[in-house]
Every structure is written in C-alpha cells, then in structure tokens.
Image: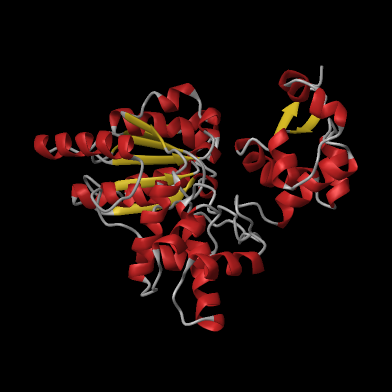
Amino acid sequence: MNWDDTTDTPAPERLVGSVADREDQAVEAALRPKDLDEFIGQEKVREQLDLVLRAARARGATADHVLLSGAPGLGKTTLSMIIAAEMGAPIRITSGPAIQHAGDLAAILSSLQEGEVLFLDEIHRMSRPAEEMLYMAMEDFRVDVIVGKGPGATAIPLELPPFTLVGATTRAGLLPPPLRDRFGFTAHMEFYEPAELERVIHRSASLLDVEIEADGAAEIAGRSRGTPRIANRLLRRVRDYAQVKADGLITRDIAAAALAVYEVDARGLDRLDRGVLEALLKLFGGGPVGLSTLAVAVGEERETVEEVAEPFLVREGLLARTPRGRVATPAAWAHLGLTPPRSQAAGNGQQNLFGT
C-alpha cells in the first residue's frame, strides 16, 4: 500500500493504469502505512531514509530536503506522509502544476510552520520563476518578495522558518541540476518484485476484510506490473467478482477468472497492450514499423501508444524501439502463441533489435 500522485489528473481508463482516480485515492487514504516499519518494499530507500530521519531527530533539527523519483504508484506520496509522521510535523501537500507563479509559491512558503513538511508532487512541472525562488528558500530559508513593477520595484526579504521539502517526480531528468543539488537526500523508487506485492495484497486484504489464499494473492501480484497501486486496484475488482460469482474467498482460480473478465492477462497486459502487439505481429510481421503507422493500426493516438502502452511492453521485453521503428521480440511471439516468420526466426538477436 505504497502509492503516490495526489495531483488533479484525469481518471485512468485502464484497470492497469498507474494514475490514481478518485476511488483509488479514497481507498489509499485508508490503507496507507503510517510509519517506515509498515512500509513494504523499497528496502534500501527505507534504510537510508530511516538514518536521515533518526539523525535529524537526534539533533533536534528539521530533516534534509528529500527528492523521490520513480514511476507513479510506487509510494512517493506515502513516504512523504511517513516523513512528516516520523518527524512529528504537519504536512502541506501541493503540486508543481498548481504553482504557476512565484507569488503562488511565496504564499505557501510564508505560511509554513517551523519543521513543517512541504510535499511538492510532480516538482518538474513547476514554473521557472517559482523554481528560481525555491532555490533560495531551500538553501537559506528566505525569499525575496517583489513589490511594485518596473524601476520602482522593491525586493523585500522574507525570512522563513526551517522546513523540509519533499519533492516527487516521475521524470527526474527534467529537473535542472541547481534544483537537484539542493536536496540533501535523493532516492529512486524501483518497481516491486512479485513477492513484495503479495505482502502488499495480503495487508490490503486484511484491512479491507477480504479473505484471500496465498495462491490467489500470487495470481494478482503476477499481473500487477510491479506497482502496488495496480495490485490494490486489481484486488478490489477480484473481491467484487468473488462476492458475486463465488463465496467471497479469493483463490487462484477465482483471481484468474476475475481478471480474465477485466482483460488483464497473466503478464499484466490489457486490451491496449495486446492490441499493439497483435497489430505489430499480425499486420507487420513483427516490424520494424513506424509509431504513427502502428497507432493507426490499433485505432489510437500516437501519444497513447508511445506514452501509455509502450513503456510497459519495453520493460517486459516484448517490444523494442529501434531507429527503423518498433520491433517485436521473440518473447512477444511466444506470449501471443504465434510463430514468427522464418526470416525472423533465423535472424540473430542483433538483427531483430536494430533492424540491421
């Protein structure tokens, strides 16, 4: 039950989407772990963060600024709340897109209490003027408020109480180096192993008062794309199926049958993912094929295929991006139970990957 992303984003249309909708946010609020001992997974991050927080408490000081990066749904917001709880401090939550002017940031900073934790989600989407103001606030706990315009403008220095900024980003590469360098602790959130997701599912099932067998949890975990948020969403849908179609107990067979109804296969691929693979294999012989052509073939926008379907397919080793276009891997043919053309079967891995 480690999640993130509390920004106002559109509700996901996919059961395996990693963006939280309103239902997710409501359930996650009840399931979030309250301290580092309850937090499942991310062992290295937890160990390092525990040292940072313990040292700060021993000194009687605020914790260093923290930067958390990683895909949506892995626990960045949860960790920010745990940081505040461990430090015994209140937390203020906002997001980069909500701060479009330096004045917006100045208003938030000037109202912080001493030791308060400011969680800034999607920090890479903050406006440049606000970003430059944040440099001084993080380093010197001071901001300059500009009063007036033109030659008569005056900068009034405003002292800030010590605070801890927790920044979260799904695209750490977009953060400018001066901002990254001002964080005392940075951590990258990794995707979860199936065994870790099983523990997440068992804990969530207990809190939701859902009966689940070990093999049922394993079945759900294997289709959750390494993401706790998706695991919990699948658990809720399987729970619904078990209550309507069975006696409420989630077994492996019940989980598999429920997820078949929702078109989530054994590797976590949904309708869109399989549509992209089937078009690539059946219409274009495994590629290479251009992204725009592939998008037309599946009846989706180019951006949808590139940003929604492709990342997981690439991470699963089912699709490769090459200079000549998208290429299916042998694993993609095997997953869909298709036989590759003789030319591909005879080709070596380097030919398949780079199309040379």
**Residue at image point 73% right, 29% down:** 321
Quadrant in the picture for the N terminus: bottom left
Decide which of 203, 301 is in the foreground and name it: 203
Residue 280 on image: x %, y %:
82, 41
From the viewer's perspective, tell me whether residue 182 is left or right of residue 258.
left
On the question of residue 157 being in view, the answer is no
Decide which of 62, 356 is in the foreground and name it: 356
From the viewer's perspective, tell me whether residue 309 is left or right of residue 256.
right
Residue 102 on image: x %, y %:
48, 40
Determine which quarter of the picture holds residue 65.
top left
Instruction: In the rendered view, tell whether residue 148 sits above or below residue 87.
Output: above
Give the color scheme: rainbow, by chain, secondary structure or one colour: secondary structure
On the question of residue 312 being in view, the answer is yes
Residue 46 on image: x %, y %:
29, 40
Residue, far top: 356
**Residue at image point 69% right, 41% down:** 310
Decide which of 327, 100 is in the foreground and name it: 327
Determine which quarter of the picture holds residue 342.
top right
Residue 101 on image: x %, y %:
52, 42
From the viewer's perspective, tell me whether residue 4 is left or right of residue 165.
right
**Residue at image point 88% right, 47% down:** 297
**Residue at image point 36% right, 26% down:** 182
